Amino acid sequence: MMGRAIRARMAQASILPVLLVVITIVSIFWQGRVQDLEASHQQRVGLLVHQAAVFSAYGLFSGNTASLQSLVQEMQREPGVISVQVFDAEGRAVASSGTSALRRFADLEALQYVERQRALQIDVLAQPILPSVVPVEDMFSPQETPTFKATVALGSAVVEVSRKALDGKKRSALLTALWVGLSGILLGGLLAYRLGDRVVNPMLRVSQMVQRIGQGNFATSQDILPDDPLRELQVSLNLMAKRLAWGRDDLERQVESVTLELRRKKEQAESATLAKSRFLAAASHDLRQPSHALGMFVARLGQLPMQPQMRQLVDNLELSVQAMQDLLDGLLDLSRLDSGNVQVRMGPVDLNDLLGSVRSALESSAETKGLRLRVRPTTLWATSDALLLQRMLFNLVINAIRYTEQGGVLVACRPCDDGSSVCIEVRDSGIGIPAEHHEDIFKEFYQLSNRAGDRNFGLGLGLNIVQRSAALLGHGITLRSQVGCGTRFSIVLARCEPGTPLVQHTGESLQPALGDISGLQVLVIEDNTQAREAVRELLLSWGCQVQEAANQVQALQQLHQHGVPDVILSDYHLGASETGIACITALRGQAGVQIAACLMSGETHEDFLQEVKAADLPLLHKPVRPAKLRSLLRHMQP
């Protein structure tokens, strides 16, 4: 294929100059030949009319019309002569031969006869007939040579000659020129082909060598012909192939060594990452039980009467517990993202409902700092995972409240990308972020304005979780901020038409409303003694009737002794082999009714979440906030 392409280009390069030369030569030859034929024709016509004028002089002078007629008839027999006419001095035709439309000599100019006949491929030529005087030789005359003196014209001779023979000769000359040109082109093409073979074949051999080297085959090529014009180049290519083969072998050894080292480093990094994820998961899980119990005890302690100094101490303790639980929630989210246990459930999301839940949950936090949290209503819907998107907005708004000292925080959404997308924006009037730190703030544990390590500002995980959640959902997130001018975070989602959301967001689920649950019979199943006592004391303070059990056997005993409870609160792990789901199922089967039940657990892995979803049980992640627990009991009470 490549050889044909090279030959074609060689042929073009060789034939084009030959073609130009041949065309030039043929053009010059044909033009010269045509000019010669035209000149010869004009000379012949001029000679014919001159002969007619000379030979007709005596007959016209003597009035011998018979002699004139014989003359013109004889001349008309010449090839191509159409007519010969002789006119007297008055322009009358004296002798005529052949076919001619000319009747009087005066019509020659008056009727534009010459132009009309030329259009018919007939040349018309006229010449005056002049008498000649031949003096008698006189030996006494001073003149030694005879002279001829012209007098008044006796008449005119007109000859009409056809140009068909001339045109035929021109065509013949053109065909000859074309034949010569074609022969030249064929000869040039043959020479170009032969030349191409002699040039292309060595080039093809070189090309094959280069292609072989490019494919990684560095073996020595076939023998090189001694008369090959590219012999030196082929020798150099063979030498280069040998050197490349040596270099490749050495490089492969180095690459293999580096690859082994990189694989070892990669395995170490993966092991470290896995160990970190396991540590975070284990630490957050192990810390959730005491944190859960601590939160319950502090909530119960806050309900007791106490002196102002003790009240202030308890309030500070409650804030510390809440900060610790927030940190555990961040570690939980991070460990779930690292382990890949986050299952995305995309569906239509009512953004107005979502923004309303953000306002109801965080408005009091903003008011505590003297800030105004504004949330603009909207009618837009978007496609996303409602819970993950809610968590992202929570982190952005909480982060904005933390780093804003005066002014407020605005949460709004608008259409973008010609209406095909929705942009959710969180704006604050805070300290702003320098441009050189716009990427750093999304890193784990990075806090720009918390150099002292104040844990009231969190661990620096919120924005990292937001960015990773956005990547998981396929949403775009951008940041615009300047020092002293506040910050704006934007999340871009795909817009959709209103539909049935997979998860309903209400302010009640996030900022629970308090209600009277006194008299509610609650069975608490918890194998951890401190956690069980903390939940019992808190429920008793709310006026609930509480029975407690550490496992399924004790729970069944409580059922037999005290009857069917209104609500079951159960931990998931109840020993080495028992689970809260199995215990709830057994209690319902024993009672014969569908008792309202809820699970409380620090587990986060996906298999556990799928099991809870299959059992159709509500789940509260430890540490459980007392307000959320009370709100859930209020909704579950019969």
Image (tube, rainbow, N blue to C red):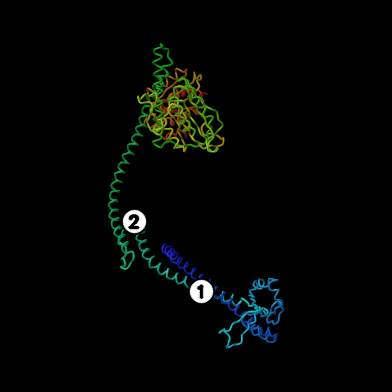
Residue 167 position, x and y percent, is 59, 75
Q: Return the residue at label 1.
A: 179
x and y percent of residue 89 in the render?
70, 78
Marks 2 and 1 sit apart, C-alpha to C-alpha, by: 53 Å
- Helix, strand or loop for disc 1: helix
Mark 2 vs mark 1, foreground winner is: 1
In the displayed structure, would residue 345 be above or below residue 83? above
Q: Can residue 632 be seen in the rendering of this structure?
A: no
Residue that appears at 32% across and 38% down: 271
Per the image, label 2 sits on a secondary structure element best described as loop
Identify the image quadrant of the N terminus. Answer: bottom left
In the depicted structure, whether residue 223 falls above or below residue 446: below
Residue at 59 percent of width and 82 percent of height: 147
Q: Amino acid at mark 1?
A: Trp
The answer to whether residue 446 is left or right of residue 43 is: left
In terms of depth relative to the viewer, which is nearer, 106 or 625?
Answer: 106
Res. 47 image quadrant: bottom right
Residue type pointed to by label 2: Gly
Residue placed furthest toward the top: 307
Q: Is residue 28 above or below residue 259?
A: below
Q: Are marks 2 and 1 in contact (CB under 8 Å)?
A: no
Q: How many marks?
A: 2
- Res 309 seen here: yes
Of residue 609 and residue 121, the one placed in the foreground of this image is 121
Q: Residues within 10 Å of mark 2 (few under 14, many from 20)?
A: few
Residue 565: give x, y in percent of width and height.
48, 23
Q: Which residue is mark 2?
A: 216
Q: Nearer the viewer, residue 226 or 142?
A: 142
